[in-house]
Image (spheres, helix red, strand yellow):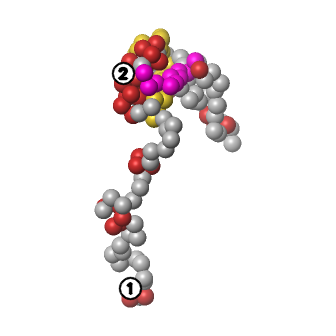
Amino acid sequence: MADELAIIGKSLVKPDAFAKVSGQTRFADDLALPRMLFGRILRSPHPHARILGVDTTRARALPGVLAVLTGDDLPIKFGILPVSQDEEALAREKVRYVGDPIAAVAATDEWIADEALELIEVQLQELPAVMSIEQAIAGGGEPVHGASNVHNAVAL
């Protein structure tokens, strides 16, 4: 039966392997188009914190920066699924996980975009992080989602 198998158990060459390892393949990072901008996102270093303020003044003044957005620029919440109607593209009042996006920058090159991120001043008040189901059920501290630690209750 093993002799009948054409793929399973055989070493196969990927059709694009040579082009990739020899530098012939063009990836998205290789593209340079007219008027192309580079984006960067400033993310939370904390798992749970209240946003006290975001000052983008210095980032906006940097030559080569065309746009800086914060959650205040995107006030309408969205949800791809009905269970996630409290999602925000950029956090406005609090961050709920390490990496939660706080601000976004568009600039003429990636180095300016990186520098602009460093110029954004974010004031965060760290809150206790809920790191287990037991901690969430026990309550105490500030809830992660509004009035509780329940993200969404669905009856099926």
Residue at position x 44%, y 48% in the image: 31
Looking at the image, can residue 146 be seen? no
Q: Which mark is residue 84?
A: none
Say which amino acid is labelled 2. Answer: Glu
Left or right of residue 63: residue 86: right
Residue at position x 49%, y 38% in the image: 36
Left or right of residue 11: residue 80: right
Q: Is residue 26 above or below residue 114?
A: below
| Residue 69 is one of the magenta-drawn residues | yes
Q: Quadrant of the C terminus?
A: top right
Q: Is residue 45 above or below residue 31?
A: above
Say which amino acid is labelled 1. Answer: Ala
Secondary structure under tag 1 reads helix
Q: Which residues are magenta?
A: 63-72
Q: Quadrant of residue 49?
A: top left
Check disc 2 and report the residue beneath it.
118
Instruction: Measure the C-alpha gap from mark 2 to mark 1.
Output: 59 Å
Check disc 1 and report the residue beneath it.
2
Query: How many residues crowd around disc 1 within 10 Å: few (fewer than 14), some, or many (20 or more)?
Result: few
Viewer-side residue, 137 vs 104: 104
**In the image, residue 95 lies at what x, y percent?**
48, 23
**N-terminal label among 2 and 1:** 1
Q: Quadrant of residue 73?
A: top right
Looking at the image, can residue 77 be seen? yes
**In the image, residue 83 lies at what x, y percent?**
63, 36
Magenta: main secondary structure: strand
Residue at position x 65%, y 24% in the image: 76
